Image: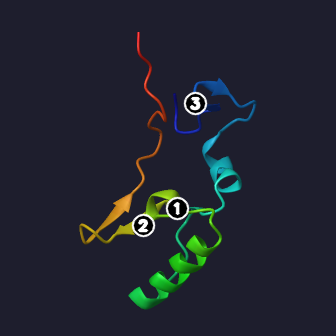
């Protein structure tokens, strides 16, 4: 698989690349919106959670997102399989 892989969960999507389609599938995917304070982050995530489309930060697929329990930033690792293949 390459960085522009047409495969998603071991299925050929019919597109040249599947990665750019993720923001269309996941409404809270892609780049994290610009925020100027932690309070603004809390406000935006509370608004997202109020939609019931996400119930925790794990349900928000921003390319980079705060990980409050560790005091770090979590960066998505691109081009890793979404499921493991067992033989």
The nearer-to-camera label among 1 and 2 is: 1
Q: Is 33 left, or right, of 21 in this rendering?
A: left
Which residue is drawn at the image coordinates 51% and 58% (left, top)? 59
Q: Is residue 74 visible?
A: yes
Which residue is drawn at the image coordinates 45% and 58% (left, top)? 58
Label 3 crowd bin: few (<14), some (14–19), many (20+), radius 10 Å: few
Q: Give the distance between the C-alpha atoms of the residues marked 3 and 1, in whole angstroms.
A: 19 Å
Label 1 crowd bin: few (<14), some (14–19), many (20+), radius 10 Å: many
Labelled pair 2, 3 in contact (Cβ < 8 Å): no
- Residue lying at the far top in this picture: please name it: 87
Residue indicated by mark 2 = 65
Q: Is residue 87 above or below residue 78?
A: above
Please provide percent x and percent y for residue 64: 43, 63
Q: Is 70 left, or right, of 74 in this rendering?
A: left
Earlier in the chain: of badge 3 and badge 1, it is: 3
Residue indicated by mark 3 = 9
Earlier in the chain: of badge 2 and badge 3, it is: 3
Q: Give the distance between the C-alpha atoms of the residues marked 2 and 3, in whole angstroms.
A: 23 Å
Residue indicated by mark 1 = 60
In which image quadrant can residue 10 be found?
top right
In which image quadrant can residue 30 be found?
bottom right
Please provide percent x and percent y for residue 24: 71, 54
């Amino acid at each position: 698989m390459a960085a522009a892989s047409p495969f998603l969960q071991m299925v050929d999507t019919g597109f040249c690349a599947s990665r750019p389609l993720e923001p269309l599938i996941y409404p809270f995917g892609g780049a994290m919106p610009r925020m100027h304070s932690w309070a603004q982050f809390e406000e935006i995530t509370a608004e997202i959670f109020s939609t019931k489309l996400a119930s925790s930060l794990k349900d928000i697929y921003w390319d980079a997102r705060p990980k409050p329990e560790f005091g770090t930033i979590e960066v998505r690792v691109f081009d890793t399989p979404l499921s493991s293949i067992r033989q």
